[in-house]
Image (tube, rainbow, N blue to C red):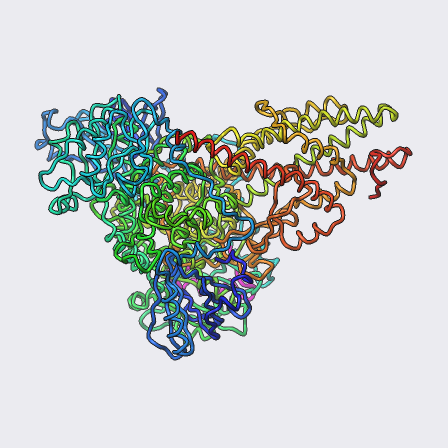
Amino acid sequence: MKTLDRARYIRADFMYQTVENVRLTDRFNTRQQIIGTLYLTATHLIFIDPEGKRETWILHSLISSVDKLPTTQQGCPLRVRTKHFLSAELTIPKERDCADLYTTLNQLKPDSYEKLYCFLYQAPNYLEKIWDPFLLATEYMRMGVPNTDWKVEDGNSNFDLCDTYPPLIYVPAMATKAMLIGSSKFRSRGRLPVLTYLHPNGASITRCSQPLSGFSARCQEDEQLLQCILKANPHSTTMYIIDTRPRINAVANRAAGKGYENEDYYSNIQFKFCPIDNIHVMRGSLQKLIETCEMKNPTMNQYLSALDDSFWLQHIKAVLDAAILITRAIEIEKKNVLIHCSDGWDRTAQCCSLSSLLLCPYYRSIHGFRMLIEKEWLSFGHKFSDRCGHTTTSDSKEQSPIFLQFLEAVWQLSQIYPTAFEFNERFLISLHDHSHSCQYGNFVGNCEKDRLDLCVKERTYSFWNFIIQNINDFKNPLFRPQSSYANEVLLPTITSQTLKLWLNMYHRFESALLPKENISNTLTRLVDHTTSLSDHAQLLEKRIRELRSTLDADQITLSSSATTASNEDADDSDIEKGNQSNKICLPEFDSGLSDVDLCQTQQRDSIPSRMNTILQPPPPPPSSSDVESGFSGDYSPHGKIPLSSFILPHQSSLDINDIPTLERIALELNSIALDWRSYNAPVHCDCSLPFDSAQRKYNCWRCGENFCTRCIERSIHLPGLYSNSLAPVCKTCARSIKSSPSFADFSALVKSKSTDFIRSQTAMKLSRSMVDQFNTLR
Amino acid sequence: MVTDLIKIPCVRNLVFRDHLQAYPESIINVTLHNVIVTHKQPDGNYKELWIFYTNMDAIQPKFPMKTEFRSQLPLSPSLASVYTIVLRLKTLETCYFDVPVLDDAIKLAESLDALIANTDGLTCDVTFLFPFCFSRDFDVIQDGWTAFSVESEYSRLQAISDEWRISDVNKDFAICETYPERLVVPKSISDDYLKRSAAFRAHNRFPLLCYLHKSSKSCIIRSSQPLVGPSVRRCKEDESVVNAMLTQRNKKGWILDTRHPNIIKSAQSKGGGCEPDQYYALWRRLNWNLEKHNLLQESFMKLMDACIDQSEKDRWLSKLEGSNWLLHVKETLKTACTVAQTIDCEETSVLVHGSDGWDTTLLVTSLAQILLDPDCRTITGFEALIEREWIQAGHPFRTRCTRSAFGRSSHGYESPIFTLFLDCTWQLLQQFACSFEFNDTLLIELFEHAYSSKFGTFIFNNEKEKKKYNGIKQTVSLWSYFNRPEILHTFLNPFYEPNPNVLWPSVAAPSIVLWRSLYLRFYENQTPQREAWDEYLLIKEKEMQLRSYVNKLRQELLELERKCTEKASNTTSIIKTEKDPVTI
């Protein structure tokens, strides 16, 4: 929460209460207490120590419990626990203040959806309330559905069949309306079997809820529908039904008129149980895990046995085991798999999404992972509001860390395959936190219908927009798209020894416990530095060519210099245009990835090819043709893509004005730091905020020093960059660069070019998606 | 003779398995020094796995193998068509051999069993070990036997303080068998005093300087326990030697005994003990409860038992807890931190000893040096540390590493103390990933070579033994092998940034984690991790190359700029008409 601008939030009219001389107790260093001031605002509980070095911001919606502890000599201690695993003990000198605070904190818990944070939240300027529409149809289209075996059915467009399913459902081509209606009546909460994933080999994953079979009931339509699902896979004569509950739970459900499929009624079915425990067991397990993490200075053995007793890692393993079983059935046995648990929105969501992730490399990209969550969790009605306890109206017995377990399972996989995932740990943590924080509207409500009723798309910001705007923070620097693990089906062998405790999730607020030097941050720094340098190198190459050509032109004959120079210029700009168009136009041709995303991968991909040229010996000195050939490999686009008509004029106008003066070159050189400060050296940011190792730090692209996220501006076009992209710059550098005289005309130039460009891009994107929507509706 | 022990030199047509794969139609050849397993790779090529005899830790035949049980064996092949021999290696690998013929299986198992017993470090003839027949197959750039001399350490020391000298008092190991011949001692102490002090210490291991801290000039000293005995004897010379090393005159030093007070008491009744306060008035005492070597061995065996248990019957974490291994790691690190704290924050000297002064003592002093001294975090510095604090300090490598985590020797002297040291170093490495010049490959290699190696570095119990068997001439030093560019570069940590500070690691329970890349490296697929490592290197390399490329471009650009301005001033025509004239 530190990212928020503090001036905006500590405003008098938002302030409920201020308490001075509050002690914050550090769990691992009980002797050391920080004395500071506590502010209670409409949205946050804020603790600031007198020097303003440490700030603890706690969003009200993240608070899971507030407990009064026995009074001590120093005052009344209040323990605040949050859903993102912060446990703060605040000792308040006066008992009345403590009681007031306690009451207000409890009153501030939202008691209805309307009071959730997302409806109040004012995002920083760079975020807009753009919800780029997620289309289930696009995702199914990617899998090649509809096809001869599977069809789309709009029978649920008014949520008639099932109110927790999306409007469009995908079912076997042979299934009739009657079968669907019949089956939906025979399934708990109408959640009939529908397609969620189709593997290239023809095997599919379908999901549903438990049948209302009791001890003897049967339903012909349901049996027929399952036969249709079986026949939709031409390669196999049998299929699996996987019940993700322990057998005993399934049997117990029979007594309540529910249960599981009777193998006598369903022919060619192999029935399997995957024992994953229910939401109540998981809630208890997390509680024990939290208690383990909160132990005061435990011995090694106390800690390990408490961790063992929590059973948390065993539960994660059970989920992963089920996912691997399904993956094997699909990939190796080529059989269809139908997954259900009780209602088909908790364990089923976990298993479907994890096995899809193992099966399909697309889901391991940031964009694909988003699709996975939109599909398996949001569209198919995982009850986020109930499971995360967004409002006080929801039953506390409904809360359960189902989504967290899924994220942790993904994290465990990313630990086994460090190069296979495009996103990093921070991305997963951020997803977890925002599923609780309600800062964005995405995870509000219990199903799509709830979100439609609340009009979240019109009234709130989108989490995915926030991710895309900060995409560099969420990328795994080790991700190697061409590696075998990023391309293939993953079939890990998971033993209990494989799984580790996720320190950065559960212990993240105890920075003293975490490694002091963080490799993944260092890697991100190296990758960012590489990006800045390669961009800068492109510009330098161009400048060198320009200067050479002017020098050459002068040498040949002074009188004809004008024509030669213009020729050279023309050549140059041609090459550039090719390059630019390659970079910029691609997003339009590929609907699969988001723009920012794609630009990034493009850049990444281009690095190896750039390195080749870098490793070549430097081009031999002047002779215009040599210069050309020396760089041609570098700049020639991979495939000639026709330029859109509206890019051209801007491009050439930039080139005309873009003639280097020595002053300009000096500005360009000064604007890019050759060396970046290591993350290990500084202990605090310029603003005196102490750095800890896990924190994301940024290097200013101009001076190369380290800064915290608050001290970095991202709205500067640095003159030294070829691509004109926005670069992170520290506030001092931003000021000095803005005030330099030659920067003014540069930025004016860039602005006219880029804003037009972005505007046209967005317009195109929106219109395209509208076309898509239109097409699918027809 | 070894050949007498080999009952069957070759077994064909068996299935060789490890934890990840099975290779049918494999062949075992038992040769003079190795068991060679020839197995077919998936690509059709044959690969040979060479297992040194010294690397075999234990076998577990899954059938009765003693001759007296032979009659009870099922004779019908239909009942038991395959006989599995499980061979556990000291490097922690497990090999399975499925032998189709019972007789072959029994003979093979008996041969292996006999060979394992024959390589016991305490009883075997050192000169029959493989390092004595290994002839060097690479060019030596720097001879490892002479790379780390007392003289070079001494010159380093002199830069900080001139109160020390090199003494030849131990020439021909005259006063202490487990110390090297040349030693650094305080200038103010004569050789006679040292001799008397040696007589007062267990195994004559008198107090010796091991580290002098640059900023505070305080030092770490190690010795063995004083022979105080039940009658509380004293030795004034020993007191002078110890006091001479208390460089900080105005402060009391600390004597850190790594044993529990009860153990000290029982040691005292047997003639040992700890320095009595009344005679060592300049020192305060501190006890730290580090376990003895045999308990560590127990713990190591339980740890590996937990690691290789795939049955899922018992809970992994409780088995891990039951092994106590991480507890030992935590306690050791904590002790080392205490020493470092005394040296750096309290600025006073510490004398560390246990009973013999060649096990836990070395563990503590060497780890404290890694925390305090940035030099120890470089590759050469780390090698020097091992040479100085372990090999020359007389850690009995051959007896301690005679068995690893699966086997049992008849004498029970084996102990994973060096492994514990490497594990603690690894814990530091993963908490301070950028402060070490080396990566965990170096630590794993050291682990493997300590237990079984073709080099002579870890096969002697002390310097005297090395001299006796002429180890320097007869064997090759591991450091000669390591210190060549092609090997060294595999040890480099791409993120290394020299860190001049003292390291203060977290020793809280959640921060101490299992060293998977050592203990589980044969039981988990390591390819994805290796791929990630390659990517690390690539990212770093890219950044470095681009940086120098940009630098070059910039210089080129400035050069061109200079030419342009020259031209501009030479000719009246301005390069670009619409621009103002420019000056640099």
Report the magenta residues as a range. Answer: B183-207
Q: Is residue A246 left or right of residue B136?
A: left
Quarter residue A297 falls in: bottom left
Task: Give residue A366's position: percent from left, percent from top.
Answer: 44, 39
Residue B197: within the magenta? yes
Image label count: 0
Tell me, yes or no, whether the highlighted magenta stretch contains residue A594. Answer: no
Name which residue lies at 38% across and 37% down: B526
Can residue B206 be seen?
A: no
Q: Is residue A609 left or right of residue B386?
A: right
In the rendered image, is residue B97 in sight?
yes
Give the image location of residue B109, x and y in percent.
22, 33
Nearest the camera: A30 or A364?
A364
Q: Is residue B160 above or below residue A194?
A: below
Indicate the position of residue A284 as horizontal and vertical percent values.
Answer: 26, 56
Does B230 sit above or below residue A237? below
Residue displayed at 74% across by 50% down: A740
